[in-house]
Image: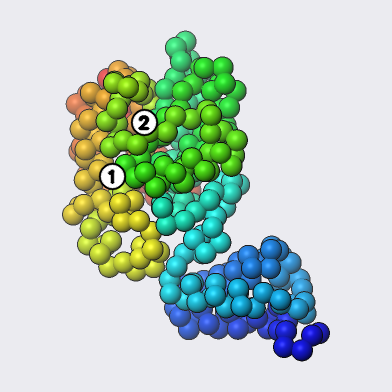
């Protein structure tokens, strides 16, 4: 081994100790991911080659410094693996969460059901798209329907920076020409320059302002606009649900991700005449609410 070069195994142990001392809840996983990132390898390689020379010691030290300050792994690596997709991530938008996979799956099931039973083209709209992870998944799942004009996909966000990131993710997955992006406040353009959707999908901010103010963990690095749901966490959800009857198509379905313990409060905001049901996640937690409009 060259003089001055540290073996990968030693660097890994140093990284684990550094992140454990910094308070990381997953120091070993974090160190493995960062070491794999700077070496251009995967975690399996890192664990299988402890004797290999580490030529990227400075890059690894810099990555450890960023993680020790609480910066999310997804921002340091520049991507998040989500639903077998590689989604580009940076401080322009919220990092896609595993729990949001249920929202994507619920949206896919709703789109598939509409396509199977409706003779008319389907319009689906993701509000607050952020990184674009959900709409990328939808576009890939229904590419042929989009190309045939049987489905229209719209994704909007109030943040121009988030829309830039969503556009980059759509382009990287080859579906940018199949999705309409809109700089919009919720469903503002619906019924005007954009059609009224039959399916609305949204992962709106539902963290309370007080929680965001603590700025712990990843909350200290992710955009406040994507996190802050107001004093009770329901400010954006309240506005969207109040606007559905006017902005969405008759008989539309809205699928909304919610936070823990919010079911009753969000159900109370349902539009007049709407049906309400809950889709639990694999752990049995209420995660997605479905509103069927009259």
Label 1 with label 2: CB-CB less than 8 Å: no
Which numbered disc, 1 or 2, marks the residue closer to the eye? 2
Q: Quadrant of residue 28?
A: bottom right
Q: Quadrant of residue 11?
A: bottom right
Task: Report the quarter where the C terminus lies.
Answer: top left
Tell me: 279 left or right of 189: right
Q: What label does residue 221 carry, if any? A: none
C-alpha distance separating marks 1 and 2? 18 Å
Density class for disc 2 (Cα within 10 Å; few <14, some 14-19, many ≥20) is: many
Can residue 64 be seen in this snapshot?
yes
x 47%, y 76%: residue? 68
Considering depth in this image, is 178 or 212 the residue closer to the camera? 178
| Residue to which mark 2 is pinned | 200
Residue located farthest toward the top when viewing the structure as drawn: 119
Considering depth in this image, is 116 or 159 the residue closer to the camera? 159
Can residue 110 be seen in this snapshot?
no
Residue located farthest toward the bottom when viewing the structure as drawn: 3
Considering depth in this image, is 290 or 199 the residue closer to the camera? 199
x 49%, y 61%: residue? 75
| Residue to which mark 1 is pinned | 263
Q: Position of residue 138 (x, y in %)?
A: 51, 33
Q: Position of residue 127 (x, y in %)?
A: 36, 37
Which colour scheme appears in the figure?
rainbow
**Residue 45, above or below 251:** below
Q: Position of residue 271 (x, y in %)?
A: 21, 29
Question: Which comes before the other along the chain, label 1 or label 2?
Answer: 2
Tell me: 86 left or right of 215: right
Disc 2, SS: strand
x 77%, y 77%: residue? 52
């Amino acid at each position: 081994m060259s003089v001055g070069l540290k073996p990968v195994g030693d660097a890994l142990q140093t990284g684990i100790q550094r992140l454990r001392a910094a308070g990381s809840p997953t120091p070993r996983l974090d160190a493995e991911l960062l070491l794999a990132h700077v070496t251009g390898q995967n975690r399996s390689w890192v664990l299988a080659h402890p004797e290999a020379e580490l030529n990227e010691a400075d890059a690894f030290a810099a990555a450890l410094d960023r993680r020790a300050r609480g910066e999310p792994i997804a921002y340091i690596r520049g991507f998040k693996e989500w639903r077998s997709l590689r989604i580009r991530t940076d401080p322009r938008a919220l990092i896609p969460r595993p729990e949001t996979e249920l929202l994507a799956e619920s949206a896919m099931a709703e789109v598939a059901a509409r396509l199977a039973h409706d003779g008319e083209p389907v319009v689906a709209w993701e509000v607050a798209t952020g990184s674009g992870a959900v709409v990328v998944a939808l576009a890939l799942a229904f590419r042929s329907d989009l190309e045939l004009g049987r489905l229209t996909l719209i994704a909007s966000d109030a943040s121009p920076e988030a829309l830039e990131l969503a556009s980059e993710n759509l382009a990287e997955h080859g579906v940018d020409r199949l999705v309409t992006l809109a700089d919009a406040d919720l469903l503002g353009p619906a019924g005007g320059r954009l059609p009224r959707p039959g399916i609305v999908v949204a992962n709106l901010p539902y963290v309370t302002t007080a929680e965001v103010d603590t700025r712990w963990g990843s909350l200290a690095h992710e955009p406040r606009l994507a996190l802050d749901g107001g004093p009770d966490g329901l400010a954006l959800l309240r506005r969207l649900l109040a606007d559905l009857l006017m902005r969405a198509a008759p008989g539309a379905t809205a699928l909304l991700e919610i936070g823990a313990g919010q079911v009753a409060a969000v159900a109370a905001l349902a539009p007049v005449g709407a049906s309400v049901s809950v889709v639990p996640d694999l752990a049995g937690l209420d995660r997605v609410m479905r509103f069927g409009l009259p």
